[in-house]
Amino acid sequence: MNYLLVNLISWLIFFFGAAFPILIVLRVIGLTGFMKVTRFENYHTFYYNMNPSVKIMLGIVVTVVAALTIWWIGAILTVVVLFTYLTLKNGKSKFITGFFLTMITIIGTTWAFAPYTPYVILQEAFHNTTITGIWTWPSYFTVMGYQKELSIQGLIYGFQISMRFTAISLISLVLVMTSTPSQVLRAINKIGMPVSITFSLVVAMRTIPRIFEYIDTSVKIQYMRGLGSNAPKTIRPFYMLVGAINAIVPVIVFLVRGAKDTAISADTRAFRAYRTRTHMQPVSIGRADKTAIMMSVLAMFVTAMVVIMGFGRAIPYL
């Protein structure tokens, strides 16, 4: 094959791993999609009736199960957690957003491992000395840590590892979407976590959706001023990325102003005036919490049995 053509195709494959997830973010999800899955909205289904500490426990259980078991159990767990998004407020919209976020995680993780994984690791993982290459990289790609060939085993290896992260990322967003910062603060404080760490987590929960909101506002203002108005439709979505980069300074300014308001709010509520906090509302364990705890215990028992039966983590990490 022509040397220039090989180099062109190689660089196109190289940029696919980074460009395609970004294209999904810009074209499909958008900033409004990120705001939907990082902001609390009041509703009445079981996630909303659950104690935040129990949701944190669910996240830990999902992490343990995905880390200890074989990859297809993580895939099943991902599908189950994703379908629970349908029970959230505007569930269909959040399900679609969660689906594309899962796609981004799979593509990004697969591409982060597939070209770089040494053949020795692949041979150990698949118990096979034969590596099936599907594309040979130019020799200078080894400077970036690439193996000589992109192999089918490398792609499978990266995909299987991605199943360790997809369910964890989805269940983590559930806590943010279904709990207010005050509820999280009360629940974590009851566990005994230091107040400084708890307060930092709560501030992060309030700040993340504001970041996307400020970026969205700044990008829209730039569009109103003509950003990308004369650009071809094929590259117009990338102007959102340009607008987001240009929005860094205004967003920082808004966040600094918001930090002042947060400090005033904490002072007016006498935050840290006493060693322990008082609560207007008791932190209770309801029916939804008891059901979740029983399911978590069952999941841990099944995980232990699955590992004993030989379906534990079969893919070695680097």
Image (cartoon, rainbow, N blue to C red):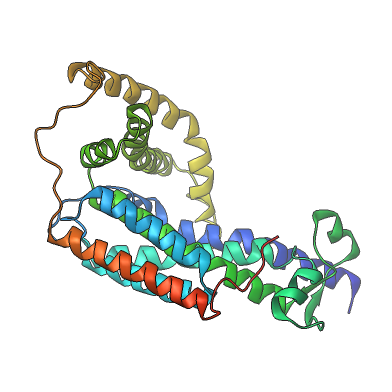
Residue 243: percent from left, percent from top? 49, 42
Residue 302 sits in which quadrant?
bottom left
- Left or right: 272, with 307 as reference point: left
Residue drawn at point x = 54 percent, y = 44 percent: 242
Q: Quadrant of the C terminus?
A: bottom right
Q: Quadrant of the N terminus?
A: bottom right
Q: Please tell me which residue lies in front, 20 or 119.
A: 119
- Left or right: 159, with 34 as reference point: right
Residue drawn at point x = 64 percent, y = 71 percent: 315
Residue drawn at point x = 47 percent, y = 56 percent: 26
Q: Does the rendering let one see residue 36? A: no
- Left or right: 38, with 78 as reference point: left
Residue 264: percent from left, percent from top? 25, 17
Residue 146: percent from left, percent from top? 80, 62
Residue 125 sits in which quadrant?
bottom right
Residue 53: percent from left, percent from top? 27, 48
- Left or right: 196, with 112 as reference point: left
